[in-house]
Image (tube, rainbow, N blue to C red):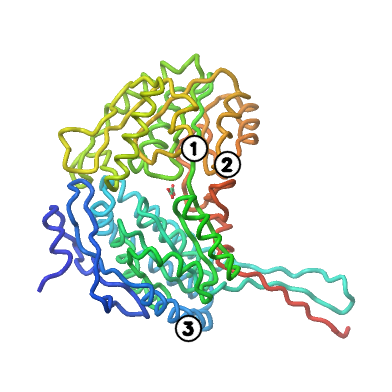
Amino acid sequence: MWSPADELQRFGVRLTDPTLLMCQGLIEGRWQDPPSGSTFPVYEPSSATVLLNCPNFSRQDLQRSILSAAAAHTSFYASTTAAGRGALLKKWNELILANKEDLASILTLENGKPITEARTEIEYAASFVSWFAEEATRSYGDVIPSSIPGSQVFTVKEPIGVCGIITPWNFPAAMITRKVAPALAAGCSVVIKPPSEAPFTALALAKLACRAGVPGACVQVVPTRDRAAASELATNPAIKKLSFTGSTEVGKHLISLASKTVKKVSMELGGNAAFIVFEDADLDLAVQGAMQSKFRATGQTCVCSNRMFVHASVVDEFARRLTEQVKQLKLGPGHEDGVTQGPLVNRSSVEKVAWHVQDALNLGGELVFGGKRPTHLASGFYFEPTIIKKASSDMAVAREETFGPLAAIFSFNDEKEVVRLANSTPFGLASYFFSRDLNRVLRVAKALEVGMIGVNTGIISTAETPFGGIKESGYGREGSKYGLAEYQVLKSVTVGSLKH
Ligand code: SIN
């Protein structure tokens, strides 16, 4: 009998557990096909061919899903303790790690990232599940001294209800668990709209959640390419919380829709990260940080450094050392041995990088390395890792995130000037800087207008670190001790007329 996993053999991939590759949605607690029979193609980015056709559910199917998630939420919260929910998450975490290889294979096929990076993402995804398994049991309220004689005030934290979860394709596993694990820990149910470019990792994770004992109706996954789906999640009155990771443009639209029913929202939106190398920086460390923060996921993370500001006295040396490292990157299909840079996710991503490169060159940028689509990998969505010097603020790369492997190097002369340049964007997600001067470290960390800063490092994403932005990069924090509260409501209880 045919199974979707058989199709993976065309790409040289065989799953240990083929049942993890689901071509159905998880709706009303059971795996099902869309009544319409509709599907949409999901592409394998290194060959630009169809990987599999995914079921395409309608807005009505999504409404059914929300309705059943609302009923499931009530019984889930009533029938579990915080410790019980923590135990379910611990089991889910174990299953994710036990199936790491299969999950990473599915992820690489639909997203394109190298298998080594996909394995790291699965570990990163699991770390949110284990983190919130612990946090579930540490959700304390307060006892508040009352100003009214004979009264006592206390607070409790309760689950907010059904959560609409909209996730991006660049981290098909980690962005699911960073939202779903705290929601389940709080006692909520979720309805997930996975990315249409990469829905299968989400479905596999949901399958493992069910195996861990999470009721299927509490972790519903509704794959769809219907644009109305996000609007449904933002407007349906049964959805009490909307968590979205994606572009600022879409985020703003969802915020306005969600305001009609005054939903709680978390928005993790676009960035335009500055990466600053001061004259006193350890240049090798700065180059290592640049490689991590620029080329992770082929430049497709919202915290990727986008504008590299390097002090004029070290800019040529920095560019030389960065070029040496970039030359070591091996571009190719994610499943091939030794590959360290995968393709981009689709054709329009390639076109955007090509346009940023061309625009920078037209406006006086100097090409140091790369700069084009590789001819030997013409069939996939590839673009060469690229370095451009002499970038300037009139270039598109200064204003918009490239979301691809372009390192644009600007030079600067003094600290005040570079802080002003770094802050001269509507976005405020992440920034990085490199310096050995402690006074400068504290001064610049205070002056940068972003939600997250990496000092002498290009890696800022871990389960324990609050993740989120300010300005038009959104609001709400994911991961960390703050992530659980995004899925809870605080209730205060005043007990009066107490007799002594
Ligand atoms: C993102 O790009 O949305 C997430 C990146 C991360 O978690 O580091």
Would you name the residue on which mark 3 appears? 71
Residue 461 seen:
yes
Comparing 100 with 490, the one in front is: 490
Query: Residue visible at 48% across and 27% down?
Result: 394
Would you name the residue on which mark 2 appears? 450
Mark 1 and mark 2 in contact? Answer it, CB < 8 Å. Answer: yes
Would you name the residue on which mark 1 appears? 273
Residue type at numbered disc 1: Ala
Comparing 345 with 359, the one in front is: 359
Q: Picture coordinates of residue 376 (x, y %)?
A: 15, 34
- Image height of 49 relative to 292, above or below: below
Please rate how many residues cluster around mark 3, counting C-alpha atoms within 10 Å: few if below 14, some from 14 to 19, many from 20. some
Query: Residue visible at 57% across and 53% down?
Result: 475
Whether residue 409 sits left or right of residue 100 in the image: it is right
Cα gap from disc 3 to disc 2, whole angstroms: 39 Å
Residue type at numbered disc 3: Ala
Viewport quadrant of the N terminus = bottom left
Q: Secondary structure at mark 2?
A: loop
Please rate how many residues cluster around mark 1, counting C-alpha atoms within 10 Å: few if below 14, some from 14 to 19, many from 20. many
